[in-house]
Each structure stands twice: as structure tokens, then as C-alpha cells.
Image: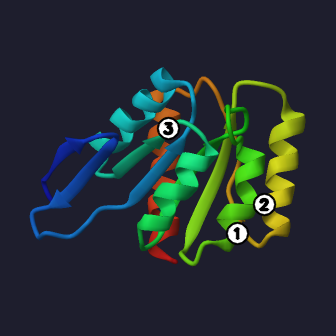
Amino acid sequence: MFASHYARHSSIYHHVNTMGDLMNQLYIADDNTDFAKYVARVASSGGWEVETCENGRALLERLATGDGPAFLLIDINMPEMDGIEAIEGLAELDRPLRLRFITGGTDAAILAAKMIAQARNLTVGRNVYKPIGKQDLTTLLHEEAEALEAL
């Protein structure tokens, strides 16, 4: 594994390995800043380039300015634009994306989000429930890194 370093700019963590290659991209859309920072720390230590967004609207804006494949962790309940409302915009983006919806609430909303996203031909993985332990999160990120390589 190549050594990596990062610089923090706003809510973006840039990871570059010693060969100058960009690392996997993770976008976290969650208004729970403590949870988003926790996921960002774990992902950054695993070599991910991480960007956090406070709602679905910010997620769509940041995704539109990026390129290449990306993994998205999207909370269902957020102010301004929630995870379900963001699905339509995600379906319109022209870049390879993998999604997982996250919630600390009940199954109904997260199951609905997954079905709506799949109906829009988005690639959606298993649901994620808060809280998630570091080992489970690390495993999830490893699975998604492998899946991104196949895109």
C-alpha cells in the first residue's frame, strides 16, 4: 500500500498516494456533523478523498463539479433537501456513482429511498444504520472501494 497524505480544505480531504494518483472519492451527506466527521476520519485514514455535505442540495452541487466514480453515503432525514429528494438530481448526473442510504430512524423511509433510487437506475448498496462501529465502517468502505474499481 502506498503512503498517503492529505490537506484539509473546507470540508474536502484530498488524498494523493506517493505516485500522485487520486484516491477513491466519498461524499457524505448528513446534517449530523459529529457523525459525518467520524465517517470522514475513518475513511480518510483508509485512503479516501472525503467531502461532507450538510444536505442533499449541497451534495448535488458538489457532485456536479467533480468527476470520476464516487461512493455516496446519504442520510434520509436532512433539512432543505433530504436523501429521498436528492435522488432525482443524482439520476441526472453523468458520472458513475454508488450509493448507500443511512439513517438512525425507522426502516420505512430508507427502504422507500432505496426502491426509488433503484427505479432511477442508480446503483444502491445495503442500507446503513446509525450508529455504525469503526470495524463495520471499515469493512463497508473496503467493499465499496472494490466496487468502485469495477465501474
Give percent across and percent down for residue 72: 55, 53
Give percent across and percent down for residue 50: 37, 48
Q: Earlier in the sequence, mark 2 or mark 1?
A: 1
* Residue at mark 1: 91
The answer, for residue 144, to whether it is visible in the render is: no
The answer, for residue 133, to whether it is visible in the render is: yes
- Image vertical order of residue 47 relative to residue 77, above or below: below
Give percent across and percent down for residue 30: 57, 35
| Residue shown at 57% from the left, 57% from the top | 60
Q: What element carries label 2?
A: helix
Q: Which of marks 3 and 1 is nearer the N terminus?
A: 1
Give percent across and percent down for residue 42: 37, 36
| Number of the label disc, if any, that sits on residue 31 | none
- Image vertical order of residue 68 relative to residue 36, above or below: below
Judging from the image, the colouring scheme is rainbow
Q: Dot 2: within a 10 Å radius of its alpha carbon, few (fewer than 14), some, or many (20 or more) residues? A: many
Q: Dot 1: within a 10 Å radius of its alpha carbon, few (fewer than 14), some, or many (20 or more) residues? A: some
| Residue shown at 18% from the left, 47% from the top | 6
* Residue at mark 2: 117
Type of amino acid under label 3: Leu
| Residue shown at 85% from the left, 38% from the top | 109
Type of amino acid under label 1: Ala
Q: Dot 3: within a 10 Å radius of its alpha carbon, few (fewer than 14), some, or many (20 or more) residues? A: some
| Number of the label disc, if any, that sits on residue 137 | 3
- Circle 3 or circle 1, nearest the eye: 1
Contact between labelled residues 1 and 2, with CB atoms less than 8 Å apart: yes
Q: From the viewer's perspective, is 91 left or right of 144?
A: right
Q: Is mark 3 on a helix, strand or loop?
A: helix
